[in-house]
Image (tube, coloured by chain):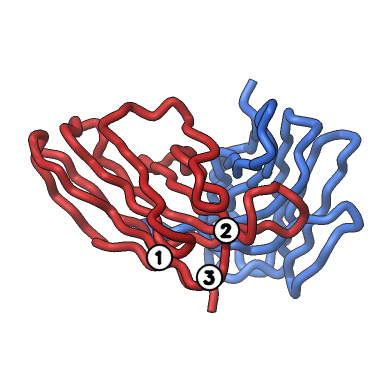
C-alpha cells in the first residue's frame, strides 16, 4: 500500500465548478500535512497547510481527519488558472529517526475548461 | 523571501562525466532535501539533511553523492550516471527536519538533467 494515495484523475470541470480532491495516508504517526500545486515542468509550490480544525484560503478549503487518516481539498468557483496537478503531502518520521520526510501522493490532475 | 535557488537549470552530461548540482537558501532553514522527479510522477525523496548532517538516505545509488557544506548550501555530486537517471532534480528546504506542525518545504525550480 502506498504511504499517500490520491485519485490521479484527470478531473475535467467547467469554469465556476466546485471540485474536491481526497487523499489518504497510511502512517498514523504523521504530523503535518500539506497541499502543493505543480504546473507542467515547474516545481511544486505550497498551496496550503492542512490543520485538524480545517482551514480556508479564499476559494480553497482544506480538511484533515486524523481518525480516518484522510485529507481533502475543496476548490470553489474554479478558474482556468487552477488547472494544474495537486499533490497531497504528508510529513512523517521513519522509525528511529527524529527527522521527518515529506511523502508525496501521486497527484491529481485538474483541467478547468471554459 | 521564500526562495530556493538551484543551478544549473539544465544539464546534459555523458555517462562518464562528473558534475554537481547546487542548491542555496537564505531563509535560515535547517533541513534541506533532494528529490528526483520523472515525468508524470510525483517527486521521490533521495536525501534529507538536518542541521547539516545527513539524516535520511532513501537507498540512493552511490553514483549520487550529497554534500552539505554549510547551513545554506546543498550539493549533489553526480558520477557515472545512467540514461535512466535523467529527470528533474528538485532541492527543497524547511524550517527544520522535525516533521512538526507547519514545517512546510519550499522548492527550487529544479535542474533538468539529461544523461546521454
User: Neighbour class for label 2 at 10 Å: few (<14), some, many (≥20)?
Assistant: many
Which quarter of the image is occupied by the N terminus of chain A?
Answer: top right
Find residue A5 and name its label. Answer: none
Q: Which residue is mark 3?
A: A81
Q: Which residue is mark 1?
A: B24
Chain letter of disc 3 in the image: A
Q: Are marks 2 and 3 on the same chain?
A: no
Chain letter of disc 2 in the image: B
**Is A32 on the left or on the right of A106, as rendered?**
right
Q: Is residue A35 above or below residue A82?
A: above
The spot of residue B57 in percent (x, y) is 47, 33
Chain appearing in blue on the rendered image: A
Residues A111 and B42: in front is B42
Residues A69 and B63: in front is B63
Marks 2 and 3: which is nearer the front?
Answer: 2
User: Cβ–Cβ below 8 Å for labels 2 and 3?
Assistant: no
Q: Are marks 1 and 3 on the same chain?
A: no
Is residue B56 something that shows in the picture?
Answer: yes
Q: Which residue corresponds to the image point at 56% horizontal and 48% vertical from the top-left?
A: B50
How far, Cα to Cα, is label 2 from label 3? 33 Å
Find residue B30 and name its label. Answer: 2
Q: Are marks 1 and 2 on the same chain?
A: yes
Chain letter of disc 1 in the image: B
Q: Which residue corresponds to the image point at 46% horizontal and 67% vertical from the top-left?
A: B25
Q: Colour of chain B?
A: red
User: Neighbour class for label 1 at 10 Å: few (<14), some, many (≥20)?
Assistant: many
Amino acid at each position: 500500500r502506498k504511504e499517500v494515495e490520491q485519485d490521479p484523475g484527470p478531473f475535467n470541470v467547467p469554469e465556476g465548478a466546485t471540485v474536491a480532491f481526497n487523499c489518504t495516508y497510511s502512517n498514523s504517526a504523521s504530523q503535518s500535512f500539506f497541499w502543493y500545486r505543480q504546473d507542467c515542468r515547474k516545481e511544486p509550490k505550497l498551496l496550503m497547510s492542512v490543520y485538524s480544525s480545517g482551514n480556508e484560503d479564499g476559494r480553497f478549503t482544506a480538511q484533515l481527519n486524523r481518525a480516518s487518516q484522510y485529507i481533502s481539498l475543496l476548490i470553489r468557483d474554479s478558474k482556468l488558472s487552477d488547472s494544474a496537478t495537486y499533490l497531497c503531502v504528508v510529513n512523517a518520521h521513519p522509525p528511529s529517526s527524529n527527522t521527518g520526510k515529506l511523502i508525496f501522493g501521486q497527484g491529481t490532475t485538474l483541467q478547468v475548461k471554459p | 523571501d521564500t526562495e530556493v535557488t538551484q543551478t544549473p537549470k539544465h544539464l546534459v552530461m555523458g555517462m562518464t562525466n562528473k558534475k554537481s548540482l547546487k542548491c542555496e537558501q537564505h531563509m535560515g532553514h535547517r533541513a534541506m532535501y533532494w528529490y528526483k522527479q520523472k515525468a508524470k510522477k510525483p517527486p521521490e525523496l533521495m536525501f534529507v539533511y538536518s542541521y547539516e548532517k545527513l539524516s535520511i538516505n532513501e537507498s540512493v545509488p552511490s553514483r549520487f553523492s550529497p554534500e552539505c557544506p554549510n547551513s545554506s548550501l546543498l550539493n549533489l555530486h553526480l558520477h557515472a550516471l545512467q540514461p535512466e537517471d535523467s529527470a528533474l532534480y528538485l532541492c527543497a528546504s524547511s524550517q527544520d527536519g522535525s516533521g512538526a506542525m507547519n514545517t512546510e518545504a519550499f522548492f527550487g525550480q529544479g535542474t533538468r538533467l539529461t544523461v546521454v
